[in-house]
Amino acid sequence: MSAEQTLDAPATGTRTLEARGVRVEFAGRGGAVATALDGADLTVRSGDIVALVGESGSGKTTLARTLVGLQAPTSGEVRLDGAPLGRGARALKAVRRQVQMVLQDPAGALNPRHTVYESVAEGLRLHGLSGGRGGGPGEEQRVGAALAAAGLRPPERFYLRYPHELSGGQRQRVLIAGALALEPRLLVADEPVSSLDASVRGELLALLLRLREERGLGVLVVTHDLGLAWNIADRTAVMYLGRVVESGPTEQVLGDPQHPYTRALLSVVPESRRVEPVVLAGEIPDPTRIPRGCRFHPRCPALADGTAAAAGVDAACRGTALPVLPAVDDHVAACHLLAARD
């Protein structure tokens, strides 16, 4: 078997990764509690690409880390194929054969003292898949196949290179190869192309689409870029201050946004032509002081321009909390204005 030939995947069939009512709290200054996630729901299935979008500070990365077991929820749970993720090291090790994460910063994620080969082989060795101490033919085949699948061909040309000898796009491909070496069914990618040139971004997005088609891989892409979501995602979930405020098929969420926050995000996307420009006042509130009622109401254009008052929901916006959106396939949004229309 050559280095570019693949091995049989240990995980077969559809995998479903779910967050259900996940809450994550951190200790803040002076004893205050920062609520990074507040009842977040999300579903990712193998064979689907899901985009998780929102401003910095919305909770996207915390939710991604919680989904792969890097952050324990304060309450709620994460499930893989209906079974709650275990908290112990052995349980999480088994989960990571199925679910892998690609971190945002390849320069920081790759050990500068490790060659490309060692970086990709590390996961195989941790999971006992390297063919014995010091590796072996099986390890080299898996490493070569993973590098080739990530677009680094011929893989042998990269084995002895160090991160500083690679371009930014190549380093990102090494991280992806390290994840693919375990042949997971689900991939969580945190801002995978945010620091790359436009041409390289396009190549890596095409790679994610190809992996979905060829391997049935499910991908959660964490991004602030709605244009990226429109180009590759089957489904999109919009986060604001720890909660998903709108979700559904991408063509509906981004083509016919229902939540004022989603419309505001879309209005600054250069490619968008159907949304009037919206300027949001201020920034996302401090997570130690989440507003009462709808958490978006201090910045909501519908309150500022009188739309909410005309619909008779302005008092509810400021004082009545909205329920957590269920993680369903339909297009749903959490907004008092929508409830008033029904």
Image (cartoon, rainbow, N blue to C red):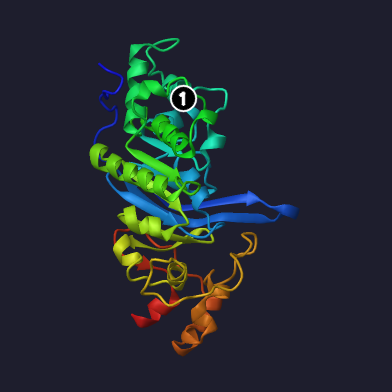
As drawn, 315 above or below 234: below
Image check: 341 left or right of 76? Answer: left
Task: Report the number of discs.
Answer: 1
Q: Nearer the viewer, residue 207 or 36?
A: 207
Where on the picture, by quarter, is residue 273?
A: bottom left
Say what secondary structure mark 1 lies in: helix
The x, y position of residue 115, in whole percent, is 50, 22
Q: Nearer the viewer, residue 208 or 154?
A: 154
Q: Quadrant of the C terminus?
A: bottom left
The x, y position of residue 326, in whole percent, is 37, 60
Q: Quadrant of the N terminus?
A: top left
Most extreme residue toward the right, as rendered?
Answer: 30
Q: Which residue is mark 1?
A: 116
Residue 49 can be seen in this image: yes
Q: Residue at x 44, y 30 (%)?
A: 91
Where on the picture, by quarter, is residue 186?
A: top left
As drawn, 152 above or below 341: above
The x, y position of residue 297, in whole percent, is 54, 74
As drawn, 93 above or below 55: above
Type of the residue with mark 1: Val
Image check: 145 left or right of 78? Answer: left
As drawn, 47 above or below 30: above
